[in-house]
Image: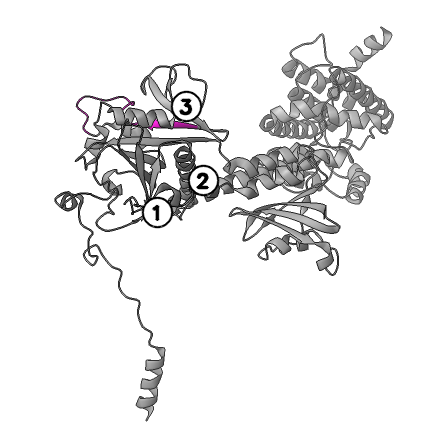
Amino acid sequence: MIERMQGFRMDEQRCTLPPPLKTEEDYIPYPSVHEVLGRCSPFPLILLPQFGGYWIEGTNHEPKDAPEADQPPCPSSHIKLETNSTAKIYRKHFMGKEHFNYYTMDTALGHLVFSMKYDVIGDQEHLRLMLRTKLKTYHDVIPISCLTEFPNVVQMAKLVCEEVNVDRFYPVLYPKASRLIVTFDEHVISNNFKFGVIYQKFGQVSEEELFGNMDESPAFVEFLEFLGHKIELHDFKGFRGGLDVAHGQTGTESIYTSFHNKEIMFHVSTKLPYTEGDSQQLQRKRHIGNDIVAIMFQEENTPFVPDMIQSNFLHAYVVVQVESACTDNVTYKVSVTARDDVPFFGPALPDPAIFKKGPELREFLFTKLINAEYACYKAEKFAKLEERTRTALLETLYEELHINSQSMMGLGGDEDKLENGGGGGGGGFFESFKSLIIPGKSPTRKKSGPFSSRRSSAIGIENIQEVQERSREVSPSPQRSSDCSHMWQENRSDNSSNHSSPEFPAPRNRVTQVCSLAMCYRAPSIPEAQDLSRSSSNASSFASVVEEHEEEAEEEYDTGLESVSCGTPLKQDSFVFSSGAEDSVSSPSQGGFPASRLEQQADGAKTSEPKGTDSRPKMERPPQEQKSSSNC
């Protein structure tokens, strides 16, 4: 009983496996071109490859016997160029008019750029919405009367795309944002096209034979004149389609035309350079093989097979076969083939697919070529390339909108990097310390003028001079003062390179000298030898830190003392910190100390041993030089 129940369970869990994928051996091959040529004519214009992969339009080319009056009207009224209408909406309805732009990041959809405009259509109020994602652009016009309440931006975005899952959108505050957005929207619109033109003679069924034709028959010349104008490539100013117009490496002439404000350059196989001894004719295939759509001109009845030409880019062919060439009754049979993943494109061929030479054929043929290229972009190969390109362009647009909007608000730049912990790890120690001794000062404020360095140097010397005078009143020991003077002279002789201008020494030497000076004035309870060794070690360790940030030190040095000079004079204890300052030296990544903690350290500094300082004040003059300068 149990085994039967388990057997039923196993049967329920079984599922039918999909049929195995078919291989080339499982397909019934189409007849080869050689088999067809062995039969009686007439032959079709196009033969499918033996194992498929292409579709064909326009297989009936038998003329009707009915009189011309009973012929159906020419389908020129149904001819329409396929364009991306969504790409032109922003320029038509948003640009130059009051609207709002927003941007955000979605975890699933990626970068999003949203546009919203209040519109009055007729007597009814509407919201015109556009949402750009990495896959497509959504557009919709929604009547406000259909909404229970006026939506916010997130709700508006969900009205056009339900997959949006964000908390908020950020407003775009950049005045030139519309130019950036319209450039992104219209990147899919192209007014320049290039098509290949291949000449197929009777009995030619291989790529080498097609690209090896050198002469042009009168019928082929007549067809080229119908397509466009023969132009000289040298110094040609129009759309060149990748051809060389300077050195003549791609031939001397080509066929060019314009159609509905679109420039078209044809890569004609017989006009591209012919290379002796090259059976593949790579100079010709290099251009035609990189086109997406090509015309195959047949002078006589020989079928064309799409896989004759090996190319990763050619996806569609328009085959044209001439009858009664170079006469007043010349006609052209037309057939179209494309790869299976290329969707159908219009205008549809008439039945039978026969045209008389004239403007109607020109209108139909060029519209078919342009629409064929747009349809090929939807094939799997080109769709992936388009998605990759669109994603990169949308990311660039997002970054431009974000950076410029932040700049308009006074944010971003170096200051934004510091706030976000940027800067590559450099300057963290100095910025933390400057925030301690100079509260409220922006760490990225630059010098305001060419004389700000001299002004801050003079003010810094005056402040340090006050510190000297107060320290003399507090410390009665004359020996300590003489020791400090000795240290000052020693540091000055070692580090100063210009004795006549003490106001402008190198920033690194100034910091070391002032650190040594600060140690002298705040060591009442330590013997002289210990004081000297401690101050020297602290000065050398601080100088090593300065070397790592030499470039930043030169720019930001003056700004620190400028803020100090604007406030109250420096106190005697302003250069002395307890063990907390050493912690900041050993761990530069830590932030600044709270103000209350600094006050406690400043109060207890008299009973503690002096520590190496991290401040960067200006170098003071020796007392003798200060007196002489004041007398002057």
The amino acid sitting under disc 1 is Asp
Mark nearest the camera among 3 and 2 is 2
The colour style of the image is: one colour
Secondary-structure class at tag 2: helix
Q: Quadrant of residue 481?
A: top right
Secondary-structure class at tag 1: loop
Is 496 above or below relative to 526? above
Residue at image mark 2: 76
Q: Which residues are magenta?
A: 264-279
Residue 322 percent location from the top left of the image: 27, 34
Q: Is residue 266 magenta?
A: yes
Residue 432 percent location from the top left of the image: 69, 37
Residue at image mark 1: 351
Q: Earlier in the sequence, mark 1 or mark 2?
A: 2
Q: Nearer the viewer, residue 177 or 480?
A: 177
Q: Residues within 10 Å of mark 3 (few under 14, many from 20)?
A: many
Q: Is residue 471 magenta?
A: no
Q: Check the image and name the residue furthest to the bottom.
A: 1
Residue at horizontal 74 percent and vertical 55 percent from the top: 150
Q: Earlier in the sequence, mark 3 or mark 2?
A: 2
Secondary-structure class at tag 3: loop
> How many angstroms separate mark 3 from mark 1 (CA)?
36 Å
Residue at image mark 3: 240
Residue 311 percent location from the top left of the image: 29, 38
Residue 594 percent location from the top left of the image: 76, 44
Is 386 above or below relative to 615? below
The image quadrant where one finds the N terminus is: bottom left
The image quadrant where one finds the C terminus is: top right
The amino acid sitting under disc 2 is Ser
